[in-house]
Image: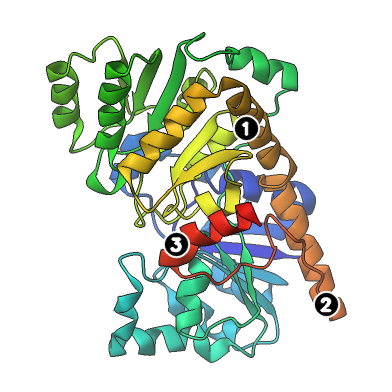
Amino acid sequence: MKITMISNYINHHQIPFSNALYEKLGDDYRFIQTEPMEEERIQMGWGVEAEKIPYVVFLKKQLELCKQLIDESDILLVGWMEREDLIVNRLSSDKLTIRISERLYREGQWKAISPKGLIRKYKEHTSHRKNPVYLLCAGAYVASDFSIVKAYPDKMFRFGYFPEFKEFTKEQLQKMHVWGEKKNQEEIQIVWAGRFIPLKHPEFAIKLAENLKKQGYKFHLHMVGGGELEGELKQTVKQKELQNQVTFYGFLKPTQVRKVMEKCHIHLFTSNFLEGWGAVVNEAMNSGCVEVANVEVGAAPFLINHGENGLVYKDGSYEDMEKQIKFLLDNPRKASGMALAAYETIASQWNAPEAAKRLLKFYEDWKKGKIELPQEGPFSPAPVIAPKKMYQFIMEEKRG
């Protein structure tokens, strides 16, 4: 079996999945990189030495080899890229092609009314609905977006990104995150990680620190990252006299971010609907943090079972976010159980080796003409739920 993945560039969110496939297939797995990584991403610590990765080939240097891989591979995985012309013939063939996509309409599904956009979506997606072309949804709102253009009927599955999985025992997790039996028995460590830009709302974390301090909670907030709002955030911390409660780290390499997560109890993720997936959610849950995430984030409805392995808050509401954080601080025993469940979610389902295993099984089922899908996790059916109805759906599912 030969598998090729083509995308803009390889990064630390894709390498574990690629490594898992390379481990199973050897030189029959290839990753085509179509362009170099942006300097901004490199400065954030995303840079990798792609030339030293044995399965990576480069479109600009090895064009003919890339075309051959696209045409001849048993499975072609297609991520985000601008060279749609490279895969036109493949999409019309009888060979299996699987797209991996984030949202079409992050800024609002009303954008689907654009005639020019609809024509492009028809050519790229809808026109191939009867061909063996499937969609892996890297986010809980992807299926809803693609259903608008009537693409991939009954052929959309849950997927995402799979950062490096780190294995811990239950005992190690409990030592890493000591939750006291009673409120304020331990100083609770909260981590926020990402770029300090408007869509990610880092100011929510600083406002939370101010309010928790006023209400007498014992906590410390770790702010990892940087960006255009950094000066304003630091000034607010100084004005509100939060220097003893908040630490700024600047940008760290992914491995260093994980070290911070591993000493924290809670990971706070405040991005809005413009966040297609949010791989820090995987990383934090793998680190044994209780995740508190905006339901608008693509990863949240796929990874978080509200009240069991984490908490989601309603549609970007600061007030609901603070409510969820305070619930954890007031109920440390329940929070400790959620932390262990969060780790188990990643360990049992949402990791690169498991995703690779399910991809290979899907191919074998497809060849036999009888596809059997898992009920949850990667390659399970992606429900079509409108963005504005997701929170209600999750709460009703929880009650039901």
Three-letter amino acid code of the residue under disc 1 = Met
Whether the residues at callouts 1 and 2 have beta carbons within 8 Å, the answer is: no
C-alpha distance separating marks 1 and 2: 40 Å
Residue density around tag 1, few if under 14, some if 14–19, many if 20 or more, within 10 Å: many
Q: Looking at the image, is 87 positioned above or below residue 383?
A: below
Q: Quadrant of residue 176?
A: top right
Viewer-nearest of discs 3 and 2: 2
Residue 301 percent location from the top left of the image: 54, 54
Viewer-nearest of discs 3 and 1: 1
Q: Looking at the image, is 21 positioned above or below residue 388?
A: above
Q: Is residue 12 visible?
A: no
The residue under the point 77% across, 67% down is 373
Q: Secondary structure at mark 1?
A: helix
Three-letter amino acid code of the residue under disc 3 = Thr
239 or 275, nearer to the observer: 239
Circle 2 residue: 367
C-alpha distance separating marks 3 and 2: 29 Å
Is 2 left or right of 157, judged from the image as shown?
A: right
Residue 34 has which mark? 3
The residue under the point 64% across, 12% down is 175
Circle 1 residue: 338
